Amino acid sequence: MDDATRGYLESVVDEDLRCNLSKDILWIKDKIPIQSFRDLVLGYTIGMFNAISLTAIRQKSRQMPTAEDLELIDSILKRRLPEILEKINRELGV
């Protein structure tokens, strides 16, 4: 990886670390208290879907996601949570 790409990735991480995570953490904690490996996998999966969604918005619009974009991503993930859980349970043999 060249230095420019590495620097860009570092800046993306820096930018994301400046965001307030409490809203995301609280809705997950409210829906599913973390108690097992399955729950850890769920958190990882939701994080990946969230990151993919944010990346898609950034690539398509070439701008940072708006507050409305973030709310829409959250609502999609919340709505699809049962489907995501079913897939994880199936994959883990639970």
Image (spheres, rainbow, N blue to C red):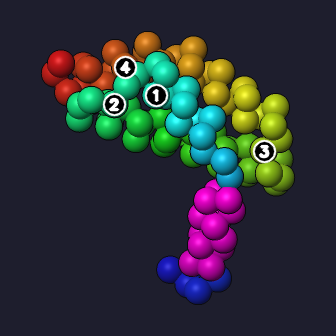
Separation of residues labelled 2 and 3 (CA atoms): 28 Å
Q: Comparing marks 2 and 4, which lies closer to the viewer? A: 2
| Prevailing SS of the magenta stretch | helix
Q: Which residue is mark 4?
A: 85
Separation of residues labelled 4 and 3 (CA atoms): 26 Å
- Residue at horizontal 24 percent and vertical 19 percent from the top: 90
Q: Which mark is residue 65?
A: 3
Dot placed on the residue nearer the N-terminal end, 1 or 2: 1
- Residue at horizontal 20 percent and vertical 27 percent from the top: 92
Mark 1 and mark 2 in contact? Answer it, CB < 8 Å: yes
Q: Amino acid at mark 2?
A: Ile
Dot placed on the residue nearer the N-terminal end, 2 or 3: 2
Mark 4 and mark 3 in contact? Answer it, CB < 8 Å: no
Residue 18 in the image, given as x and y percentages of width and height: 68, 59
SS for callout 4: helix
Dot placed on the residue nearer the N-terminal end, 1 or 4: 1
Label 1: few (<14), some (14–19) or many (≥20) C-alpha neighbours in 10 Å: few
Image position of 55 with respect to 4: above or below = above
Q: Which residues are magenta?
A: 5-18
Can the viewer see residue 49 in this picture? no
Residue 28 in the image, given as x and y percentages of width and height: 49, 28
Mark 2 and mark 4 in contact? Answer it, CB < 8 Å: no
Q: Amino acid at mark 3?
A: Pro
Residue 61 in the image, given as x and y percentages of width and height: 83, 47
SS for callout 1: helix
12 is within the stretch colored magenta: yes
Residue 8's quadrant in the figure? bottom right
Q: Comparing marks 1 and 4, which lies closer to the viewer? A: 1
Q: Which residue is mark 2?
A: 34
